[in-house]
Image: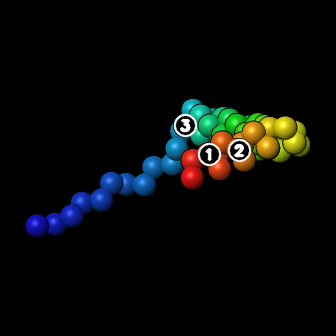
Amino acid sequence: MSLTTLPHTSPTRRQRTRRLWTVRLGLVLLVLVLWAVFVLYTQPDFMVMLADQVWACF
């Protein structure tokens, strides 16, 4: 029984472009999520409400 390997093929221009846009979209989403968390942490009322809800679970 022999194993055959597929020849190495480089990605096409379309695949590279799609991957680039996917990475960019992921980075943009990451930055937006981090920004939203920062904004929520700068609001003391929200943090108190969140702490009260977490404390209510126990």
Q: Position of residue 28 (x, y in %)?
A: 74, 37
Hey, which residue is sitting farthest bottom in the picture?
1
Label number found at residue 56: 1
User: In the depicted view, which residue is nearer to us: 58 or 11?
Assistant: 58
Taking the image as shown, residue 42 lies to the left or right of residue 24, namely: right
Gap between marks 2 and 1, in whole Å? 6 Å
The amino acid type, in three-letter code, at marker 2 is: Asp
Instruction: Tell me the residue that label 3 is attached to.
Output: 15
Mark 1 is surrounded, within 10 Å at the Cα level, by few (under 14), some (14 to 19) or many (20 or more) other residues, namely few
Looking at the image, do the residues carrying marks 2 and 1 touch, with CB atoms under 8 Å apart?
yes
Instruction: Tell me the residue that label 2 is attached to.
Output: 52
Could you tell me if residue 14 is visible in this image?
Answer: yes
Which residue shows up at 45% across the image and 49% down it?
A: 9
Q: Quadrant of residue 53?
A: top right
Mark 2 is surrounded, within 10 Å at the Cα level, by few (under 14), some (14 to 19) or many (20 or more) other residues, namely few
Looking at the image, do the residues carrying marks 3 and 1 touch, with CB atoms under 8 Å apart?
no
Label number found at residue 27: none
